[in-house]
């Protein structure tokens, strides 16, 4: 008999996207959804359509485009939310309405001001309404792990009776521990008649660093769907990391006799795609996908590794898509080699894409001797976005020093031709941003600025992420260059162009949010 299948429900675009610094625009969400589809997750939770017009549009776009996986949309157990979720989802090949209501006394009393009886009524009506739209309905008992177990049994009975096909038991505040969570799942399985006709799902937050362990304990107790996010992003300390859950199930098949449909060799690329889109760098010692996850530093370890890889590695880097040596191309590499390497990295480029990438690559290889995979990924993420470049960098000159004001001279290509401005600032980056503001007529307020090196060496490409408030709306931008002032300018311009794109395609009014 084969191993039992665990469904992987990815909520990077919903719960993950709710975390600070991880917001994505429609184009970026689509790019991430395509990557999740390639990764072969079972379910993509695409967003929370009632939260905003942008969220609605993203769910709709993903539902239209991603045909393989189930596409889920979140909604509270109230009619307006559920109708809105269905409106966004209805063109999906496999739509799922995911409706939720809090069930702990703490949430019922302080957040919802509802009695348990009122909650049961809302669940009954909400699930039934969702079922009137689609046969695939998930119900989540928010804060389940702090709910009264007997009440949770009632909740599950009502949701099941009203037609829920998936019952999710979230550890919303990351409070439970593996043994207790496993016992809770067992309690529900033994006290809710017919529960095994539904899929039991788990959704763990990482406040105590136990999200993956709790998810696996629940699987051992009978859960068959795990909700998780790439790189573990999510509210507060995040959600269970998809790559950790998937690789634990794969590496410890002896202790956990289950399988997933995830293409493990795409885990690293998916992690990088998310990090590049959001600018949230993966911590170096992050399990599976961190920069150091397969690095061996001490002499004893290196000696062991040279004798046999199994001494210090429980899985190979290749098994999750990390190349042992990522040194790839240099100045004399041609278009063909570049196209091939991009394809290996999972970015098959069309002619126009390759032309653009090659231009960026040759410019980079003039500045830098060795070009690593990380550099190429930065090129592809930075240079090939679909945001129209209303303003484009033509030239930059910046000066700075300890005994002078920093100054910048910036020339941009604009719709009316090239234009140049100068400005002073606290430092060269500040001066450059001020010059750009003069040129664009937009006044940006910098909310966040992050700089990191994408590869190794003194000539490494620096990647800058900014978040800038234009006209009361935050816009993320990223830029890469071996010169950090230029990378900063490119990031800022990227945010300017996004702001203009959003302004030109703005739709009416966002509606109220709130999970
Ligand atoms: O953490 C949580 O409880 C959630 C639910 C809405 C599923 O994200
Ligand atoms: Zn959550």
Image (tube, rainbow, N blue to C red):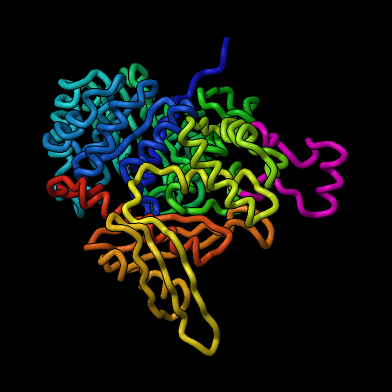
Residue occupying the far bottom of the picture: 403
The vertical placement of 426 against 256, above or below, is below
Point out the image quarter for the N terminus. top right
Q: Give percent across and percent down for residue 123.
A: 18, 33
The answer to if 75 sits in the magenta stretch is: no
Residue 153 figure quarter: top left
Residue at 32 percent of width and 25 percent of height = 166
511, 96: nearer the viewer: 511
Residue occupying the far top of the picture: 1
Residue 97 figure quarter: top left
Residue at 77 percent of width and 53 percent of height = 297
175, 237: nearer the viewer: 237
The answer to if 302 sits in the magenta stretch is: yes
Residue at 63 percent of width and 50 percent of height = 365
Q: Which residues are magenta?
A: 291-319
28, 352: nearer the viewer: 352
Q: Give percent across and percent down for residue 311.
A: 80, 39
């Amino acid at each position: 008999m084969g191993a039992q299948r665990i469904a992987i429900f990815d909520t990077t675009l919903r719960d993950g996207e709710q975390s600070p610094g991880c917001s994505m625009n429609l184009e970026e969400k689509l790019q991430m959804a395509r990557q999740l589809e390639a990764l072969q997750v079972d379910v993509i939770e695409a967003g929370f359509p009632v939260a905003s017009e942008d969220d609605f549009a993203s769910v709709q776009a993903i539902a239209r485009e991603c045909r393989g996986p189930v596409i889920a949309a979140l909604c509270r157990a109230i009619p307006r939310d559920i109708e809105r979720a269905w409106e966004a989802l209805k063109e999906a090949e496999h739509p799922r309405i995911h409706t939720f209501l809090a069930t702990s006394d703490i949430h019922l009393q302080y957040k919802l001001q509802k009695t348990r009886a009122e909650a049961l009524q809302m669940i009954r009506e909400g699930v039934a309404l969702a079922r009137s739209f689609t046969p695939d309905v998930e119900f989540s008992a928010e804060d389940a792990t702090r709910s009264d177990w007997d009440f949770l049994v009632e909740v599950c009975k009502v949701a099941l009776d009203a037609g829920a096909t998936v019952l999710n038991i979230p550890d919303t505040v990351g409070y439970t521990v593996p043994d207790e969570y496993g016992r809770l799942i067992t309690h529900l399985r033994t006290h809710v008649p017919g529960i095994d006709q539904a899929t039991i799902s788990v959704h763990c937050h990482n406040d105590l660093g136990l999200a993956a362990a709790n998810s696996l304990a629940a699987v051992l107790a009978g859960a068959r769907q795990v909700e998780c996010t790439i790189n573990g992003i999510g509210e507060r300390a995040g959600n269970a990391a998809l790559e950790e859950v998937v690789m634990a199930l794969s590496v410890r098949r002896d202790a956990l006799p289950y399988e997933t449909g995830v293409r493990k060799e795409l885990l690293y690329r998916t992690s990088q795609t998310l990090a590049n889109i959001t600018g949230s760098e993966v911590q170096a010692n992050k399990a599976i996908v961190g920069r150091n996850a397969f690095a061996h530093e001490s002499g004893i370890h290196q000696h062991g590794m040279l004798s046999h890889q199994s001494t210090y590695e429980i899985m190979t880097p290749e098994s999750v898509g990390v190349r042992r040596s990522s040194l790839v191309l240099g100045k004399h590499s041609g278009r063909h080699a570049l196209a091939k390497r991009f394809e290996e990295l999972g970015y098959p480029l069309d002619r126009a894409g390759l032309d653009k990438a090659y231009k960026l690559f040759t410019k980079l290889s003039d500045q830098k001797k060795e070009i690593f995979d990380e550099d190429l990924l930065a090129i592809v993420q930075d240079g090939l976005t679909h945001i129209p470049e209303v303003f484009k960098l033509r030239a930059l000159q910046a000066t700075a020093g300890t005994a002078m004001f920093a100054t910048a001279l910036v020339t941009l290509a604009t719709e009316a031709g090239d234009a140049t401005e100068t400005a002073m600032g606290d430092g060269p980056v500040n001066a450059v941003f001020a010059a750009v503001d003069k040129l664009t007529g937009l006044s940006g307020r910098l909310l966040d600025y992050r700089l990191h090196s994408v590869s190794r060496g003194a000539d490494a490409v620096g990647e800058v992420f900014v978040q800038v408030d234009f006209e009361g709306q935050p816009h993320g931008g990223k830029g890469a260059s071996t010169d950090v002032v230029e990378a900063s300018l490119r990031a800022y311009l990227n945010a300017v162009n996004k702001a203009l794109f959003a302004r030109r395609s703005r739709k009416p009014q966002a509606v109220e949010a709130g999970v």
